[in-house]
Image: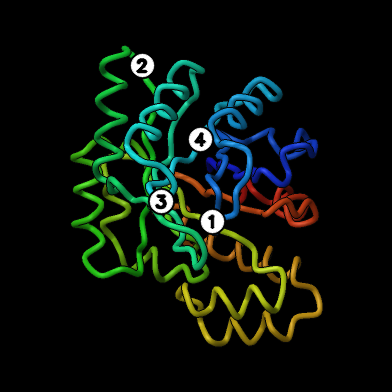
């Protein structure tokens, strides 16, 4: 089983060496929730040099105009990053969203400059298995140049299993998982993701959220590892969670 790891800007300075043995690539987010942080492209390059791992910079369509986005693409190509992960970016309550281009246009731009510069940089995009007509959206992303996909965070394996088309895509799909490590986060994400009511109650009543999140992740992996290429872990810097799942990450 393959897996990738997200390292957020808040945790760049931590030493992740103990958890990178089986990691295929590292991703760096791009101003998640509209919170400004160090640029994803230079941070991805820093991690590439530090750990000798393939790294992927995220670029969102929310924060920059087309010129600014092209600048980021060219920087990622010149720095020989493994890939660029395309997202639309979370909606923000404060500040102005740019969104001069959409995700399909951004994927096409990366494909164009990859060709122009003779680069082999990979293009990643998102899958939201809970969204209606998602296969049509995924096909359009592939037509525009997407080379791999990472799903939104999965908390119910049935979302993967019922979307049988995921297994038959011609490009790799990584199922995302972000542990829910506080009651506030559980409440927030239960409104945005398909989380079974029983699981929400179990997590809300939990005396050990790290243990219960790890058990949930292991359950999802056991039931879906034949349907996806691997898993993308977004631990939000929680080393105890990483330590817990690193022992069982090769269960498939």
- Categorize mark 2 by other alpha carbons within 10 Å: few (<14), some (14-19), many (20+): some
Q: Position of residue 38 (x, y in %)?
A: 63, 38
Residue located at (39% from left, 40% from top): 124
Pointer 2 and pointer 4: residues touching (CB < 8 Å)? no
Asked if 71 appears above or below 169 in the picture, the reply is above
Q: Nearer the viewer, mark 3 or mark 4?
A: 3
- Categorize mark 4 by other alpha carbons within 10 Å: few (<14), some (14-19), many (20+): many
Pointer 3 and pointer 2: residues touching (CB < 8 Å)? no
Using residue 49 as the reference point, say whether residue 78 is left or right of it.
left
Q: Quadrant of residue 84?
A: top left
Q: Nearer the viewer, mark 4 or mark 1?
A: 1
Give the SS element for disc 3.
Answer: loop
Q: Nearer the viewer, mark 3 or mark 2?
A: 3
- How many numbered badges does the structure rendering display? 4
Q: Which residue is mark 2?
A: 119
- Categorize mark 1 by other alpha carbons within 10 Å: few (<14), some (14-19), many (20+): some
Pointer 2 and pointer 1: residues touching (CB < 8 Å)? no
Q: Position of residue 39 (x, y in %)?
A: 57, 36
Q: Which residue is mark 3?
A: 62
Give the SS element for disc 2.
Answer: loop
Pointer 3 and pointer 1: residues touching (CB < 8 Å)? yes
Q: Which residue is mark 1?
A: 34
Q: Which residue is mark 4?
A: 57
């Amino acid at each position: 089983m393959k897996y990738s790891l997200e390292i957020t800007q808040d945790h760049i300075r931590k030493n992740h060496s103990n958890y990178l043995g089986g990691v295929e690539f590292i991703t760096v987010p791009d101003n998640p929730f509209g919170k400004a942080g160090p640029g994803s492209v230079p941070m991805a390059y820093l991690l590439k040099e530090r750990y000798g791992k393939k790294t992927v910079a995220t670029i969102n369509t929310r924060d920059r105009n087309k010129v600014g986005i092209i600048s980021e693409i060219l920087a990622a190509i010149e720095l020989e990053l493994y890939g660029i992960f395309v997202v639309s970016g979370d909606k923000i309550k404060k500040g102005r969203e740019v969104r001069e281009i959409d995700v399909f246009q951004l994927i096409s731009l990366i494909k164009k400059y990859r060709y122009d510069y003779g680069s082999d940089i990979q293009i990643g995009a998102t899958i939201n298995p809970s969204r209606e007509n998602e296969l049509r959206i995924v096909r359009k992303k592939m037509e525009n140049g997407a080379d791999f996909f990472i799903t939104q965070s999965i908390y119910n394996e049935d979302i993967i299993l019922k979307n049988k088309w995921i297994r038959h895509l011609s490009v790799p799909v990584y199922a995302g998982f972000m542990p829910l490590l506080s009651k506030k986060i559980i409440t927030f994400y239960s409104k945005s993701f398909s989380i079974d009511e029983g699981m929400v109650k179990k997590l809300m009543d939990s005396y050990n959220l790290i243990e219960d999140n790890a058990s949930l992740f292991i359950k999802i992996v056991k039931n879906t590892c034949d349907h996806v290429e691997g898993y993308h872990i977004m631990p939000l810097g929680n080393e105890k969670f990483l330590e817990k799942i690193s022992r069982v990450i090769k269960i498939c």
